Amino acid sequence: MRRPNLAFLCQPAGAALLVSFLLLAVGLVRWHGGRRPNFPLEHSNVAYSLATGAGYSNPFSVVSGPTAWVPPAVPLVDAGAIEFARALGIDERAPIVGINIFAALAAVFLTLRFSLPYWAPSSRAVFCAGFLGYSVLDPDFLVSSGPLTAAESALLLAGLAAASRNPGGWRPWAMVLGANALLAITHPGLELAGALASLVVGLPMALAGMRRPLALIRSTSFAAFAGLALGAGPWTIRNYIVFHQWIPAKSNGYFELVHSQDDSDTGVLTDAAIVGHPATNPRLLREYVRLGERNFLEPYRRRANEILRNDFGRYCMFCFNRFIDAVWFGKALTDIEMLSVRLQPSQAARLVGRRLILMCAGTPNFFWARRDVPASTELASLQAAGIDEPNAVLADWVRAQGIIRARMESLAATLTSFAWSGFPTLCSIAALMVGRRLTPRLVPATAAIYLVALIPNILITHDMNHQGNFMLLFAVLAAGAVEAIFRRAGGPASPVNLGR
């Protein structure tokens, strides 16, 4: 019997097909097993508004008017997928899943074909395994924004690596321009990092071509800023026409800063922060609808300026906490648990008012949040709120606290948090410690892109869900550590470009 020829799987196209097939299989098994992925809320709501002819509006499931709450790439793509599904009469989720699987395939192919072509087979295999692993760790991968940002990040790295091998080539130029244009309307942090990385790679050529316009235009520096204008320009103009404000990325930066400062204890958001978001807070949602987005956000602009003036020390500490959460050990998000006792509406209202329980708009349920206080203190708070049967409610609080602690402190939660934060950092450090001439240049470049892309998260808001946008970079860093060790053991020792 002849052995199957697996050589195709060692090629970029074959490896990309295998990874994308495994991702689809795992996702569908989860889906049919009852674990339905969650669509990104604001993006999907705007997508449905676009698909129904209501325009770029309504990010919170109610009619609220025009919005710039989220960048336009994901809503536009999802809106097209929804309209396509309706035209064919199929499940609206199917085209979105198909787009994400294709994006994952493109991300793997571009990275293997252009960024890692000279790396050892074992390093390339680690990249594929790392990308697959991070995708599986994200339970919402099939419908999230992660695959699109992964494909765009792969296009950026591919363009930069190709440009370092062939300065002035039109294919690297086109990839850099396309990546920056797409990132500008998808992920502002990655666009900032992509523009700076493109500037660094293309600066020598740009300087040399200052007196030769064609050479200047062919540099990646020019491509990056042309891509930025191509992507963010129409979006910014639209926002100025609608809101009479220059909004090149998204409108809610001041809101997110205040939300992190006032609705968290450390500056790192968890599920308990639902009390301060219009997507889940009925009072804020009513204000958002009544005032419209621009007027709703105005008090948050003033509050943000007040924080920076009068509470700058606490703000800096929260920024430091967000940085540590992203690069060393992430905080688990699931710090709430649903109540299993029934409360009279008046009693529930009092508990919500005292923030002893949380209420989520759009559901009939209330939630306990994690509270590190003795049961006696909680009982006194319940009695002060006038609860008819405080002991029964306290028993449910004790049950919920046990579930929350077990969920947040479990080994699985610890390893998952570390995988999204400290593991990429350790991979970067390991690759750099091997030695300057042995470390692939792509490793420090990727690490720098990641750190720059984190800047908006660190300065404004952060939770572990944000890390899903960097899974492609994390997989490259893991492969880079293996490649550096391989070179130390006797592999190629003189990298001559970004891909080597």
Image: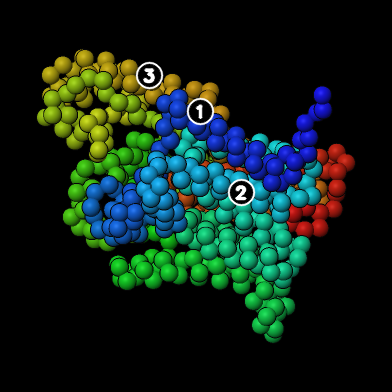
Residue 12's x, y, as percent? 71, 46
Residue on which disc 2 sits: 107
Tell me how far mark 3 sits from mark 1, CA to CA: 30 Å
**Mark 2 or 3, which is nearer the eye?**
2
Position of 412 relative to 310 (above/below): above
What's the residue type where badge 1 is placed? Val
Is 189 on the left-hand or right-hand side of 366? right
Residue on which disc 3 sits: 402
Where residue 17 sits, quadrant-wise, is top right
Mark 2 or 1 closer to N-term? 1
In the image shown, does 428 or 82 lie closer to the viewer? 82
Determine the residue positioned at 84% across, 41% down.
Answer: 488
Determine the residue positioned at 54% across, 55% down.
Answer: 190
Residue 72's x, y, as percent? 41, 58
Residue on which disc 1 sits: 29
Tell me how far mark 2 sits from mark 3, CA to CA: 41 Å
Is 356 on the left-hand or right-hand side of 328? left
What's the residue type where badge 2 is placed? Ala
Position of 189 relative to 399 (above/below): below
Determine the residue positioned at 30% across, 54% down.
Answer: 52
Secondary structure category for the residue under label 3: helix
Mark 2 or 3 closer to N-term? 2
Position of 369 relative to 74 (above/below): above
What's the residue type where badge 3 is placed? Gly
Asked whether the beta carbons under mark 2 and mark 3 sit within 8 Å of each other, the answer is: no
Tag on residue 233? Answer: none
Residue 55's x, y, as percent? 31, 60
What is the quadrant of the N terminus in the image?
top right
